[in-house]
């Protein structure tokens, strides 16, 4: 069994109501929001592990000037690894309590001891959609993926630990999340997401068994406790169009978008998830991902 020390990271859901006021010569008529954007979130620590139980805390979504748009209490993590659900009404114009598509809100975590000043934000998306977001409860450093130009954030405590190995084994080479130190075909960033050791080629996210049980595909894999996993599928491996699939933690259980691994944080174990076959599909290929 392998355990790791971690700082706590929470994810929160925001509730905001919006009104759009049309001004006419003789009167002003309020117009209700045209939809709601839902966001499931979680807070995570230095090793990308979900905080299962944070205690009394609240997440506030606010503008840069401090205007609070919405807030939500933080609960214990559910089986998908979510700590909160934000319900954000979306309108065509912003007011003191309204949001527009593309608007960025700062997210502040508050506890009985005060606010935790960790820079996290979310961008409001189109209504009638569900989004997932993760927030760090620790200092982070941003890296831009040269392949797609997207930025990711990695806790500095994690980087410092890997850098200590680089100082000894690679003559002080700077940490690069897009490299593959153990040459196993998974980037260092991918190993961070999965909770595996980036310079140990025996430690990686691995599928142990794939079979058919109770009319469903059963996928068993080795997990690291506190981490979240999801499955995508495609009909071909020639230019595959991967689409995330809903999964079950038991054959007859409820469908989930992703799965929080059982066991203590950092402990290695096994998880089995079930996927309903697509009707009339001539072939299906599956990809297991750490989120």
Image (cartoon, rainbow, N blue to C red):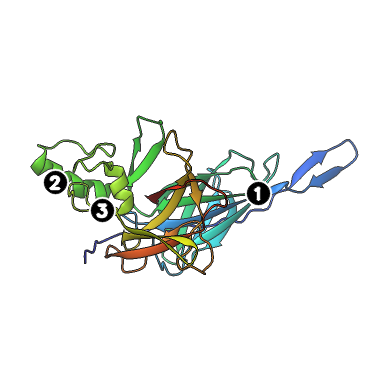
Locate residue 59, reporting x and y percent. Answer: 50, 58
Among the two numbered marks 3 and 1 on one chain, the one whose residue lies closer to the N terminus: 1
Q: Can residue 81 be seen in this view?
A: no
Q: Residues under labels 2 and 3: Cα distance? A: 15 Å
Q: Residues under labels 3 and 1: Cα distance? A: 36 Å
Q: Quadrant of the N terminus?
A: bottom left
Locate residue 122, reporting x and y percent. Answer: 51, 45
Q: Is mark 3 on a helix, strand or loop?
A: loop
Residue 77 versus residue 230 in the image, above or below: below
Q: Which residue is drawn at 32% across and 65% down?
A: 270
Residue identifier under label 2: 165
Q: Residues under labels 1 and 2: Cα distance? A: 46 Å
Disc 1 versus disc 2: nearer the observer: 1
Q: Residues within 10 Å of mark 2 (few under 14, many from 20)?
A: some
Q: Is 153 in front, or is 73?
A: 153
Q: Residue at x 53, y 62 (%)?
A: 255
Q: How crowded is mark 3: few (under 14 residues within 10 Å), some or many (20 or more)?
A: many
Among the two numbered marks 2 and 3 on one chain, the one whose residue lies closer to the N terminus: 2
Q: How crowded is mark 1: few (under 14 residues within 10 Å), some or many (20 or more)?
A: few
Residue 71 versus residue 262 in the image, above or below: above
Q: Is 30 in front, or is 225?
A: 225
Residue identifier under label 1: 128
Disc 2 versus disc 3: nearer the observer: 3
Residue identifier under label 3: 196
Locate residue 162, reporting x and y percent. Answer: 20, 47
């Amino acid at each position: 069994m392998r355990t790791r020390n971690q700082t706590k990271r929470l994810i929160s859901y925001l509730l905001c109501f919006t009104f759009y006021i049309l001004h006419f010569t003789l009167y002003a008529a309020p117009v209700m929001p045209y939809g709601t954007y839902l966001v499931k979130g979680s807070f995570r620590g230095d090793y990308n592990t979900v905080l299962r139980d944070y205690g009394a805390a609240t997440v506030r979504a606010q503008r840069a000037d401090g205007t609070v748009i919405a807030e939500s209490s933080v609960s214990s993590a559910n089986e998908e690894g979510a700590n909160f659900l934000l319900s954000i009404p979306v309108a065509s114009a912003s007011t003191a309590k309204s949001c527009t598509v593309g608007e960025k809100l700062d997210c502040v975590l508050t506890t009985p001891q005060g606010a935790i000043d960790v820079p996290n934000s979310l961008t409001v998306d189109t209504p009638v959609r569900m989004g997932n977001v993760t927030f760090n409860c620790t200092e982070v450093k941003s890296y831009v993926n040269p392949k797609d130009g997207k930025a990711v954030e990695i806790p500095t405590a994690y980087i410092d630990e890997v850098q200590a190995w680089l100082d000894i084994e690679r003559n002080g080479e700077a940490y690069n999340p897009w490299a593959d130190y153990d040459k196993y075909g998974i980037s260092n960033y991918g190993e961070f997401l999965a909770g595996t050791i980036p310079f140990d080629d025996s430690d990686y996210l691995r599928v142990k068994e794939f079979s058919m049980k109770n009319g469903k595909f059963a996928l068993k894999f080795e997990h690291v406790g506190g981490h979240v996993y999801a499955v995508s599928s495609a009909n071909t491996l020639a230019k595959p169009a991967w689409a995330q699939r809903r999964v079950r933690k038991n054959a007859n259980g409820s469908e989930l978008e992703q799965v929080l691994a059982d066991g203590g944080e950092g402990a290695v174990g096994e998880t089995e998830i079930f996927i309903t076959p697509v009707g009339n599909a001539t072939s299906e290929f599956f990809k297991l991902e750490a989120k």
